Each structure stands twice: as structure tokens, then as C-alpha cells.
């Protein structure tokens, strides 16, 4: 499936004669977000070999292709590029890099969902699985932070060349900044001990909501210099917001009622009893 997905991206490049450019509009960004998530999930599977990375790669890739399919129903997905976007270099750098950051954030959010659900419904959810999932989410978030930050800076350079200013508080620019800030909040909260494993995953789930708004939601506003692209699909986006936010609220309420400060309880590992006569 990943090979066919890759062939589809390369075919679009060939047809449009934009070599090295993966993303030209919102439709192609949905295709690329799925491709990037599958690539990252496959790499996670190679390192951790627990099946979770491959499963989440498949799920995120599948969902983004459904989104792309519905976006394609509205007309031509290879329409003429707007003049401000007609730059192979910046489309191949800024847009590709920042969209790769979207892929990473969505994958981190999906992995965080798995952590919470396993902690609630699986009684043999042990510490080793919890640690590996937390390491996967933390690593993917670091990756997303790097690509989101670099992509935002590249976008500012492009804006300076196209519009004569690096930053103008445009809705799309604000959305990109929100992603960077959300990633920094997650990383600093975890490094500073403000949140433990459970809090890390809850923040990562909310990070997917932020990306959904920054990637797709700002198109619904219809204002600003970045108000190009599709503006339909609001119902699907609101449904995504609702499901994610309700999930967070329910899990936090259950967590508080359980009175457990460390999130889903991992099955304790039995330790060997110390032998008599030995200092421990």
C-alpha cells in the first residue's frame, strides 16, 4: 500500500511537471499527510517492533485518504496554481517540510490515543509497553517540532519575497505558529515534570486538534492572504474536533474519579524477594 501511495505522489509530480513538489493544494496535502504518517509509523515499527507503529500508520494513512477522496469530489485536483504559489522551489521546501510536520503531529496523536485506550481496556498493559509508547510519542513530537519550526521560518522567507513582509499575523501564519507553540508546550511540560506519561499523551491528542485547525480550519475562515484552497468540509472538521475533545474530557474525568495521578495504571511487575543475609 505504501508503494502504491508513493507511486501516486510521483505520478502527480510527473503529470503536473513539478518535480520534487509533493503538495500543490489541500487535496494533495491530505495525500501527503497520509504518506508521511505511514513512513514515520513504519520507521517506528522498525525500532520498536511492537505492532503499534504499523497499526497507527495504517489507520492514519487510511483516514487521510478518505479525506482526500472527499476533497477530490468537488472537482479538478490539479487546477491551475495561483500566481503567489507558482514556485517549485518554495513548494518543494516550505510546503513539504511543514506538511511533514502535520503528518508527525497526527501520528503522535494517534499513538497517544492507543496509550490511553490500552491503559483503560487492557488489563495486561505493562510498564514496558507504556514506556515504548511514550518514547514513540515523545520522539515523533520532537520530529514534528523541528519540521514545523523550520517550515514556518521557510514560509516567512517566502512571504517576504512574495509580499514584502516576513510575518503579517495572517490566519494561516497564526495556525503554523500555534502548532510550533503546542509542540513546545508538550516537550517543555514533559521535560519539566509538569506532566507524566498520561499528561504527555493527553496533550498529544489535543495537538492533533490544533493541527486540524491550522491545516484545514483556517481555510473555512475565508480571510487573509492564505484564503486559497478548498473551503468545504466544515462538518467533517467539526466532527473531528468534537470526537477528540469529548474523548479528552471523558478520559480526564475518569482519571480524576479514579484518583490516579499517573494515568492508566500499568500492571505492576513482580520483583524477586531479597535473600536473607544480603543487604539490599
Image (tube, rainbow, N blue to C red):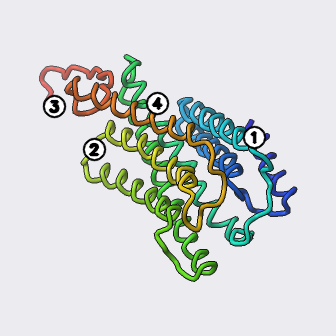
Q: Secondary structure at mark 3?
A: loop
Q: Nearer the viewer, residue 191 or 74?
A: 74
Q: Nearer the viewer, residue 112 or 215?
A: 215
- The residue indicated by pointer 1 is 73
Residue 155: image quadrant is bottom right
Give the CA distance from mark 1 to mark 2. 43 Å
Give the CA distance from mark 3 to mark 2. 31 Å
Q: Secondary structure at mark 4?
A: helix
Q: Nearer the viewer, residue 130 or 228?
A: 228
The answer, for residue 132, to whether it is visible in the render is no
Q: Residue furthest bottom?
A: 164
Where residue 122 sits in the image (x, y, percent)? 41, 18
Look at the image and tell me in which quarter the C terminus lies: top left
Residue 242: image quadrant is top left
Q: Which mark is residue 114?
A: 4
Q: Which mark is residue 280?
A: 3
- Does 171 appear above or below 142? below
- Whether tag 1 and tag 3 are in contact, CB under 8 A, the answer is no
Q: Earlier in the sequence, mark 4 or mark 2?
A: 4
Give the CA distance from mark 4 to mark 2. 18 Å
| 10 Å crowding of disc 2: few (<14), some (14-19), many (20+) | some
Where residue 92 sits in the image (x, y, percent)? 70, 65
Q: Earlier in the sequence, mark 1 or mark 2?
A: 1
Mark whose residue sits in front, 3 or 4: 4
Q: Earlier in the sequence, mark 3 or mark 4?
A: 4
Q: Earlier in the sequence, mark 1 or mark 4?
A: 1
Where residue 221 sits in the image (x, y, percent)? 53, 55
Amino acid at each position: 500500500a505504501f508503494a502504491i501511495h508513493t507511486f501516486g505522489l510521483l505520478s502527480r509530480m510527473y503529470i503536473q511537471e513539478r518535480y520534487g513538489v509533493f503538495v500543490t493544494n489541500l487535496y494533495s496535502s491530505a495525500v501527503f499527510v497520509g504518506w508521511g504518517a505511514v513512513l514515520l509509523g513504519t520507521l517506528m515499527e522498525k525500532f520498536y517492533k511492537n505492532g503499534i507503529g504499523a497499526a497507527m500508520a495504517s489507520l492514519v494513512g487510511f483516514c487521510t485518504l478518505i479525506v482526500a477522496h472527499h476533497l477530490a469530489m468537488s472537482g479538478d485536483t490539479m487546477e491551475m496554481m495561483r500566481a503567489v504559489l507558482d514556485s517549485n522551489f518554495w513548494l518543494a521546501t516550505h510546503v513539504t517540510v511543514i506538511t511533514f510536520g502535520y503528518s508527525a503531529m497526527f501520528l503522535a496523536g494517534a499513538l497517544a490515543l492507543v496509550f490511553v485506550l490500552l491503559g483503560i481496556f487492557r488489563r495486561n498493559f505493562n510498564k514496558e509497553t507504556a514506556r515504548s509508547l511514550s518514547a514513540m510519542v515523545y520522539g515523533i513530537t520532537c520530529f514534528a517540532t523541528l519540521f514545523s519550526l523550520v517550515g514556518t521560518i521557510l514560509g516567512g522567507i517566502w512571504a517576504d519575497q512574495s509580499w514584502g513582509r516576513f510575518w503579517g499575523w495572517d490566519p494561516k501564519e497564526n495556525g503554523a505558529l500555534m502548532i510550533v507553540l503546542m509542540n513546545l508546550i508538550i516537550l517543555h511540560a514533559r521535560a519539566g515534570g509538569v506532566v507524566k506519561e498520561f499528561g504527555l499523551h493527553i496533550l498529544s491528542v489535543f495537538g492533533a486538534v490544533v493541527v486540524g485547525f491550522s491545516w484545514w480550519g483556517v481555510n473555512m475562515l475565508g480571510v487573509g492572504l492564505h484564503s486559497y484552497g478548498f473551503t468545504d468540509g466544515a462538518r467533517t472538521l467539526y466532527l473531528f474536533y468534537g470526537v477528540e475533545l469529548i474523548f479528552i474530557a471523558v478520559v480526564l474525568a475518569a482519571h480524576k474519579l479514579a484518583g490516579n495521578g499517573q494515568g492508566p495504571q500499568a500492571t505492576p511487575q513482580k520483583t524477586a524477594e531479597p535473600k536473607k543475609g544480603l543487604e539490599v
